[in-house]
Amino acid sequence: MSGPVEKSVCDSHGTIYLNCPNRKSLHRGAVQHWYFGWNIVAAATVLTLLTAGMRLGMGPFFLPMSRDLGFSRSLLASIMGVGMLCYGLAMALAGYLVGRLGTRSVLLLGTATVIASAIGTVIARTPLSFGLAFGVLMSLGLGLASPVTLTPIISRWFTRQRGMALFFLSTGSMAGIAVMTPALTFSIHWLRWRTTLVGFAMVFAVVTVPAALFIMRDNAPRNADLLPEQIRAQNAATTKVRESLRFRAAVRTAPFLKIALGLFACGFSMNLLGAHGVPMLMDHGFDAMTSSLGIGTIGLVAILGTLILGRLSDRMPRRNILAAIYFIRGLGFFALLLVGTRGELYMATAAAGMVWAGSIAISSALLADIYGVRLVGVLYGTAYLGHQVAGMISTWLGGWGFEQFGTHWIAFGSAAVLLLLGAAVSLRLPSTGFTLMAPTLVSEP
């Protein structure tokens, strides 16, 4: 390179390049600085680990709570079922509040609610007070600090690497299940469930409050992490259409309905497997430990799967990846009904684990691509409500179907069919990049 070296900022996310009017010089003389958006991703991943770990790791609390409070299993299960629905409603509320109050305020509100829930739960003695504290308030607090709250801010800070960034939330969810479940079990064994719950609320506050105050910044750089040529390629006309689209119009569009249908199938299958996977395998002749290890393999493999899918989601059409996720999951549910040996079981669950946590991250990335970051929070929360409603239905169907017909094919077969339908519908989503479709999308059949 001859002549004086001229420094210039060729994009707006804090990366300084040397003489970079074109892409060639980007790769030869780049001096890159840490992009602050990854700090937000790291904090969001830890928060997701805590919220998902508690929300999906209620199992260790079940029997100790039941014995200590004198509640029947059916009563406590009903309270937790109500909590599942409240969690979905809270996520829809979180999506709305983020647009009104900002990420920081919603996270702090969620933290205060979790603390109030923990205090109310440990002093509760009646089913009503316990249900309000643990079933409703805990679900509300965790929902306000859920990925729905964190998705909009990550979508603002990332465009080129949006898929990878959002996939870290799924990694946090899977790590939450893998880490929090044994940690809660150990703590309950030594400290009892009340102390464990209060301890969780304190740890949650210690992590969430500093993250909300010092890391979460809703005002992202204008062009996020786009490269210069991608900034120049953006279409101003489609941006104007995106900004004018309103929530009521968006939820009636074909792409939103297709994504919501896929998330319904996701919620139906995930909650069915969580509630009835081990009993189904035991009914098919596997012992309890083998059944548990088989289902546990899904969560362990899913951590690796999220990292691989995250990289692919920024390099391939996201609709194709989403369709592949649902398709492989659908085949996996059929496989679980047919496996007869340990080897077949572990092969089936390992394959399912590779795509187990990807649908939510891809769906939220697609919503941001199609509708823009202004609406992604409330749209994601609304779609996720269907995810939770589907979970309630499948949890009930798994027990009712087996009692009525003596087979798990009713529930698990339904899950497989819904997932395959979700795969077919996902292929009909728009092929999104960094632009929005034409406004005729609203009237698409």
Image: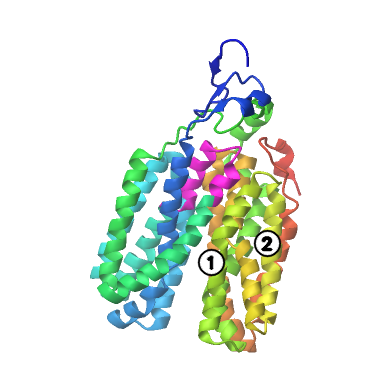
- Residue 409, placed above or below residue 434: below
Residue 361, percent across and down?
57, 52
By what rule are the colours in the image chosen? Answer: rainbow
- Residue 242, placed above or below residue 5: below
Residue occupied by mark 1:
299
Residue 202, percent across and down?
28, 57
**Residue 12 seen in the current view:** yes
- Quarter of the rendering occupied by the N terminus: top right
> Which region shows up in magenta?
145-167
Q: In which quarter of the image is residue 213?
A: top left
Closer-to-camera residue (308/252): 308
Tell me, yes or no, whether the highlighted magenta stretch contains residue 164. yes
Residue 326, numbered circle: 2
Closer-to-camera residue (38/343): 343
**Residue 126 seen in the current view:** no
Tell me, yes or no, whether the highlighted magenta stretch contains residue 136. no
